[in-house]
Image (tube, grey):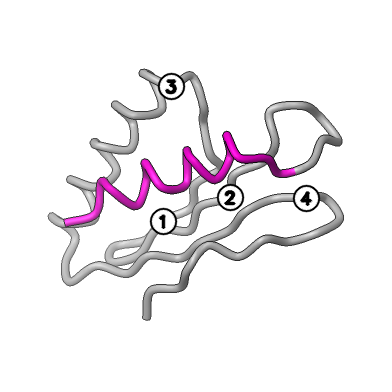
Amino acid sequence: MDQPWTHRQRPERLERRIEFADYETTRVFLERLNDLSEQEKRYPDISFGRTYVNLTLRPQQEDGAIEAVDHAIAAAIDALLP
């Protein structure tokens, strides 16, 4: 089941789990995410398996708060979904 972005505290971060139908779809998403990350110079923490991806977005400033720019990156990631 896909989960929406969740705002966590201590340390502040946004987290999301995305599930896919098959490995090919997972791989295509990860390639798109790579392109976006390189373009935006924002690199989420990623863990993945054959049919899922777990993402964690941390604030740009160490020990900072989640801000509008972080939500904008999350929305850009969402736009990559098939």
Find out whether residue 71 is within the magenta segment.
Answer: yes
Q: Which residue is mark 3?
A: 40
Mark 4, mark 2: which one is toward the viewer? Answer: 4
Among the two numbered marks 1 and 2 on one chain, the one whose residue lies closer to the N terminus: 1
Q: What residue sits right under mark 4 in the picture?
A: 12
At label 3, the amino acid type is Glu
Pointer 4 or 2: first along the chain: 4
Which residue is farthest bottom? 1
**The disc labelled 2 sits on which kind of residue?**
Thr
Between the C-alphas of marks 4 and 2, the distance is 10 Å
Occupied quadrant, residue 35? top left
* Residue at the (82%, 35%) spot, across then down: 64
Q: Residue at x 38, y 20 (%)?
A: 38
Taking 57 as reference, is 21 left or right?
left
Circle 1: element type: strand
- Classify 4 as above or below 53: below
* Magenta span contains residue 30: no
Q: Which element carries disc 3, helix, strand or loop?
A: helix
- Labels 3 and 1 touching (C-beta < 8 A): no
Please determine whether, in this image, residue 82 is positioned above or below residue 32: below
Q: x and y percent of residue 28 in the render? A: 17, 45
Question: Which corner quadrant of the image does residue 65 belong to?
Answer: top right
Secondary element under disc 4, as helix, strand or loop, is loop
Residue 3 position within the rendered picture, expressed as x and y whole percent measured from the top left: 45, 73
**In the image, what residue type sits under mark 4?**
Glu
Disc assigned to residue 56: 2
Residue 43 x/y as whole percent: 51, 31
Distance, label 1 to label 4, CA atoms, is 21 Å
Q: Which residue is mark 1?
A: 48
